[in-house]
Image (cartoon, rainbow, N blue to C red):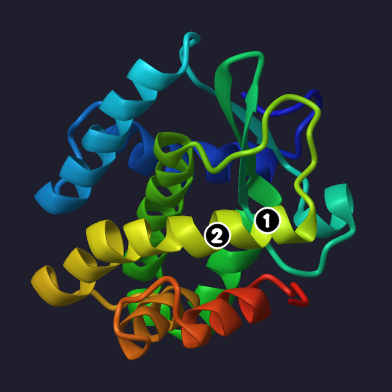
Amino acid sequence: MLNPNPKPEMVTFLERRINPIFNSLLKGKYRLGLIQKAFLENDKLIRGKYPVPGKFINSDKTSLELFNQDIQMPLRCRVEKGQPTILVLVGDWLAIFNKLKASIPPKAESVFESMLAIALNHEFDHFALGTIPQDDHIDTPTEAFESERTTWPRTCERTLKPFIEIYKKQLSDNDMGYHNAWMACGRNAESEEWRSFIAEAYGIEL
């Protein structure tokens, strides 16, 4: 479901492009086994950590419209009264998909699918590790930095590496950026190179 009175094109895009990938992961039917395994391992940890089953909230808005942020963050997660919650900004996802279609038409759908799977696994990594805002708490820049610095290594190792090294998939420039930075820093989350990369990626001043 989207927010009340959603734009028709957003409803169609959610149902045709986003839901099939998310649902396949949630139901244990995603076609790339290692990606599915990473997701299910997170899901098991999450079910043991939080008392209330998770939920998705879909919005046809963009990051700019809702949060006045130029950086697109099409999935946002938090824990509300013990319930893992993911906000899906369909407006951001549609803009990303249209950009891919314009820049890499033959690969747009494949790259977009990988982006969805990586993004969802990353948010589940946050929940599994507990690196996530709770209730009304808003992370300070330092807290947000530490959250991403410690969570992205899990995503790089368990999701990005299989996509690239095992399944030989072309990924988005953004996702490749995380993979390349992680490998370049020697897979060391404490390294200055990794800290600088995460700070720049999220526009955080250290």
Q: Position of residue 103 (x, y in %)?
A: 51, 86
Q: Nearer the viewer, residue 173 or 157?
A: 157
Q: Which residue is mark 2?
A: 148
Q: Residues within 10 Å of mark 2 (few under 14, many from 20)?
A: some
Residue 94 visible in rendering:
no
Amino acid on which the number 1 mark rests in the picture? Ala
Q: Nearer the viewer, residue 17 or 25?
A: 25
Q: Nearer the viewer, residue 201 or 193?
A: 193
Measure how far apart labels 2 and 1 are at the Cα level: 6 Å
Residue drawn at point x = 35 percent, y = 90 percent: 184
Dot 2: element: helix
Q: Is residue 120 above or below residue 82?
A: below
Residue drawn at point x = 57 percent, y = 17 percent: 83
Quarter of image, res 206: bottom right
CB of mark 2 within 8 Å of CB of mark 1? Answer: yes
Q: Nearer the viewer, residue 149 or 118?
A: 149
Amino acid on which the number 2 mark rests in the picture? Glu
Q: Position of residue 74 (x, y in %)?
A: 62, 53
Q: Is residue 33 left or right of residue 77?
A: left
Residue drawn at point x = 10 percent, y = 48 percent: 33
Q: Is residue 175 left or right of residue 87?
A: left
Residue 61 visible in rendering:
yes
Dot 1: element: helix
Residue drawn at point x = 69 percent, y = 63 percent: 72
Q: Which residue is mark 1?
A: 144
Q: Position of residue 10 (x, y in %)?
A: 65, 43
